[in-house]
Amino acid sequence: MNFELSQEQEMVRQVVRKFVDREIQPHIQEWDERGHFESSIMKRLADLDLMGVCIPEEYGGSGMDYNTLAIVCEELERGDTAFRTAVSVHTGLNSMTLLQWGNEAQKQKYLIPQAKGEKVGAFGLTEPGAGSDVASLKTTAVKEGNHYILNGQKTWISLCDHADYFLVFAYTDKSAEHKGISAFIVERTMPGFTSKAIKGKLGIRAGNTGELFFDQVKVPEENLLGEEGEGFKIAMSALDNGRFTVAAGACGQILACLEESVKYCHERETFGREIGKHQLVKQMIAKMEAGYHMSRLLVFKAGELKNQGKRNTRETSLAKWQACDFANEAANDAVQIHGAYGYSNEYPVERFLRNSKAPVIYEGTREIHTVMQADYVLGYRSDKPLSKGLPAWPYSQMKEEV
């Protein structure tokens, strides 16, 4: 196994890092304090061909591998979780799902403009009473002629006010339980669709998160993604992609905590010497370093399985669980290292701590992933190949297959 970044991956890492240092770092404290999502960042990421990193070139993307997407997410979250979240939702949950499950007409109409960054995509699964228990969702889609009529509500939806297209999950047959869930591509401009931002969040305040409302929304039958009843499978495969990007972003959060803590260790002195000289401070720094490298290895393992076109639910779950826990712990230690200053926004570590909590909850809670990993080991759970997996990278054969 080769653990070195390729020349192309290192180039992408440098491009994103410079972008973050120039475009995000000087403004993020103000955006966070105001609860402002700077949507122009998405356009500038598109200008750098970073909105469709792992989407094949024939569908408007950059055609790079899945671990390159991980590097982009890591570097973006080093700046702030809000912008990694935007890429996770747009690319990981939406565009990669369209690539995996969409028909050719859907890819031409929706995937290509998203991969180019001309349009923004989002994902609508969670509801007020349906989070980890996906089958308890209430949104319905009733077939009438050549349309479906959607009614219901979604919540905690990233990019709720900025996305152009949404992947929305609704029951077409409630009696079939989770096998009666279907997936739809919903456009913001469809009559009956509205959104509303959620205010007062603990963290990721520079991100846009909120609710979606569907009141007799008329969706053409050609916007059904996959077949009726495949929605649960589609949602779970989408979460494999989203969780992968969340885990990669958590590596960036750990790295940000480490960089700020090391800097402060050399600036601050107590008892006549730099605080980095104290053994218990070294212990916290060492934990961050170990957590970063262990998390990154787990992410890259999952990414390599994606590159090979293999199912990676188990590996991605482990990476997401561990990386997010390590990031939360690293942020807590970073505040501790900064002492009283870490409790104020004079230093960015208090923002890191606030931001680090949400990823432990969304895309499968810590508890969900703990149960999943135990079930794999105990033999209660096993994965079968998906009927439609992500295409293996490189995509040289895709044109022939299409």
Image (spheres, helix red, strand yellow):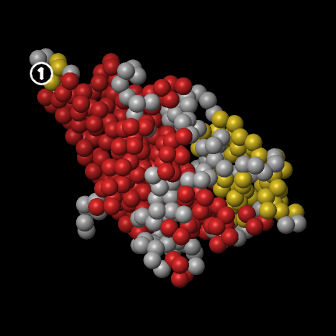
The tally of labels here is 1
Q: Which quadrant of the rendered structure holds the N terminus?
A: bottom left
Q: Where is residue 393 in the image (x, y as percent from the top left)?
A: 43, 71
Between residue 95 and residue 283, name the one nearer to us.
95
In the image, residue 395 above or below residue 181? below
Whether residue 377 is visible, yes or no, is no
Q: Quadrant of residue 310?
A: bottom left
Which residue is painted at 75% across and 42% down in the image? 194
Element at label 1: strand
Whether residue 73 is visible, yes or no, is yes
Between residue 243 and residue 159, name the one nearer to us.
159
Q: Position of residue 22 (x, y in %)?
A: 38, 37
Q: In this view, does 22 lie to the left or right of 369?
A: left
- At label 1, the amino acid type is Arg
Q: In this view, does 346 lie to the left or right of 282?
A: right
Which residue is painted at 46% across and 73% down in the image? 395
Q: In which quarter of the image is residue 266?
A: top left
Q: Residue furthest front?
A: 47
Q: Residues within 10 Å of mark 1 (few under 14, many from 20)?
A: few
Q: Position of residue 134 (x, y in %)?
A: 64, 54
Q: Position of residue 333 (x, y in %)?
A: 31, 32
Which residue is painted at 24% across and 30% down in the image? 263
Q: Name the residue under label 1.
A: 273
In the image, residue 96 above or below residue 353? below
Which residue is painted at 42% across and 72% down in the image? 394
